[in-house]
């Protein structure tokens, strides 16, 4: 489960449910304080859920992506 490290705006979601991801692969881009931060996968697995969408504002600790 990947959580938001800071409050921000989801600018782009780069994976979809069912995708296989590798460690370090970019999952989404979060914009905070006018800087865009790519959120990487902490490990390999399958994307099970993406409870956020492009254009949504998230707070610190909100779940961004669930990987199994």
Image: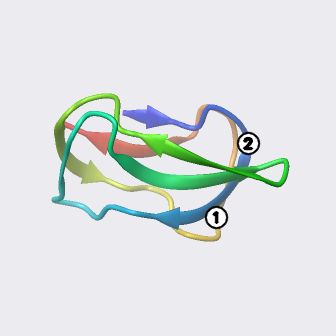
Crowding at dot 2, Cα within 10 Å, few <14 / some 14-19 / many 20+, comes out as some
> Residue pushed farthest right?
33
Numbered circles on residues, count: 2
SS at badge 1: loop
Q: Nearer the viewer, residue 1 or 11?
A: 11
The x, y position of residue 7, in whole percent, is 73, 42
Question: Which label sits on residue 29?
Answer: none
Going by the image, does 16 lie left or right of 54? left
SS of the residue at dot 2? Answer: loop
Instruction: Please tell me which residue is depicted at 70% across the width and 42% down the height of the picture.
Output: 59
Return the residue found at the far bottom. Answer: 55
Q: Is 8 above or below relative to 2?
A: below
Residue 30 in the image: above or below residue 54: above
Residue at 53% x, 66% y: name it.
12
First in residue order: circle 1 vs circle 2: 2
Circles 1, 2 touching at the beta carbon (< 8 Å): no
Q: Is residue 13 left or right of residue 23?
A: right
Q: Quadrant of the N terminus?
A: top left
Where does the C terminus fall, quadrant-wise? top left
Dot 1 crowding, Cα within 10 Å, few <14, some 14–19, many 20+: few
Q: Residue at the location (18% across, 35% down)?
A: 44
- Residue 39 falls left or right of residue 32: left
Report the coloring of the rendering: rainbow
Q: Provide residue 25's location: percent of width, then percent of height.
A: 32, 44
Q: Which mark is residue 56?
A: 1
Q: Which residue is mark 2?
A: 7
Residue 28 location, x and y as percent?
Answer: 47, 55
- Distance from Cα at disc 1 to Cα at disc 2: 11 Å
State the image coordinates of residue 45 (x, y, percent, origin top left): 16, 39
């Amino acid at each position: 489960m990947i959580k938001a490290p800071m409050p921000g705006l989801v600018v782009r979601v780069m994976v979809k449910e069912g995708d296989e991801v590798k460690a370090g692969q970019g999952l989404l881009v979060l914009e905070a304080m006018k800087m865009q931060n790519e959120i990487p996968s902490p490990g390999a697995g399958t994307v099970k859920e993406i409870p956020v969408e492009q254009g949504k504002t998230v707070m610190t600790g909100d779940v961004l992506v669930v990987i199994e």
